[in-house]
Image (tube, helix red, strand yellow):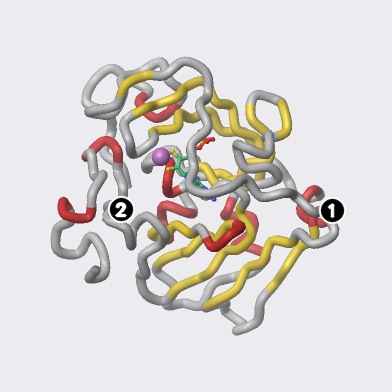
Amino acid sequence: MGNPPPTSGSGGSGGSGGLPPGQRLVQGWPVSHYGPVPRFRPERWNLQVFGATATGGKRAWTFDEFTAFPRTTVVADLHCGMGTTSTGHEWFGVSPVSLMELVPPAADVTHIMVWAEYGYSANLRLADFTSDRTILATHRNGESLTAEHGFPLRLVVPHLYAWKGPKWVRGIEYMARDRRGFWEERGHHNIGDPWKEQRYAHQEQEGDGPAL
Ligand SMILES: Nc1nc2c(c(=O)[nH]1)N[C@H]1C(S)=C(S)[C@@H](COP(=O)(O)O)O[C@H]1N2
Ligand SMILES: [Mo]
């Protein structure tokens, strides 16, 4: 879990505190991702939970079914691993814990891989995914996400760099051991805590992640 911010404050909790080391504040909300923006096709969209579930089975929800889930609000900043932070985001969406209650993990699950359109993925420790500030967001500042920012569903993990939060989420895989996601395989830190400035894989210490 992330260290608390150095001094004054609210840190990851909404932008009135300090920035993580080496980050600079940007105005507004820049768009940043690898590859094209996927087109949303409601009739084909689903959200799947699979991997090491307690029953061994998988679950999938259509867009309409997902829309009926209980929602919650989290105010949090986005810290891009390339050095910019955008603030003032009020995320509205579904708590990962509520999904996991519907599809319990097997007893040996330690990590989660979150999958997005076009094969983008990010690995998380179970406790990162189940943090009470982590949210599968459908809305930001009261409006539906735009296509560029991840419509219809993106993950936000406030205490980690933003690459840990896939836009255009489609799948949640329960894992009994850690595996590297898209950027974690390509030179980025396996944990990605901005308060410890864990940007690159070469900074990893024993136990931070599986061998590259
Ligand atoms: N599917 C997908 N999600 C992604 C990425 C990506 O390339 N593909 N990039 C990540 C990175 S590096 C950042 S900084 C944030 C940017 O989110 P924003 O465009 O809403 O600011 O999205 C994250 N989620
Ligand atoms: Mo980023």
Badge 1 crowding class, 10 Å Cα cut-off, few under 14, some 14 to 19, many 20 or more, is few
Give the residue displayed 22% in from the left and 40% down from the top: 196
Q: Residues within 10 Å of mark 2 (few under 14, many from 20)?
A: many
Foreground: 132 or 145? 145
- SS at circle 1: helix
Q: Which mark is residue 100?
A: none
Give the left or right position of residue 23, taking residue 43 as reference.
left
Q: Position of residue 92 (x, y in %)?
A: 65, 35
Above or below residue 162? Residue 129 is: below
* Point 79% across, 48% down: residue: 67
Using the image, determine if residue 177 lies above or below residue 7: below
Q: How many marks?
A: 2
Circle nearer the N terminus (1, 2): 1
Q: CA distance from mark 1 to mark 2?
A: 33 Å
Spot occupied by residue 113 in the image (x, y as percentages of width and height): 48, 64
Asked which quadrant contains residue 16, the reply is top left
Quarter assignment of residue 211: bottom left
Task: Give the vertical position of 123 relative to 22 (above or below).
Answer: below
The three-letter amino acid code for the residue at tag 2 is: Ile
**Would residue 4 appear left or right of 132 to someone viewing this image?**
left
Q: Nearer the viewer, residue 138 or 185?
A: 185
Q: Which residue is located at x 79 percent, y 54 percent? A: 41
- Of all residues, the one furthest to the front in this rendering is 36
Residue where numbered disc 2 is placed = 191
Q: Residue at x 48, y 36 (%)?
A: 32
Amino acid type, callout 1 = Asp
Q: Taking 82 as reference, is 128 above or below it?
A: below
Splitting the image into 4 quarters, where does residue 100 fall?
Answer: bottom right
- SS at mark 2 in the image: loop
Which circle marks residue 64 in the picture?
1
Image coords of residue 107 (percent x, y): 46, 77
Q: Seen in the image, is 113 located left or right of residue 209? A: right
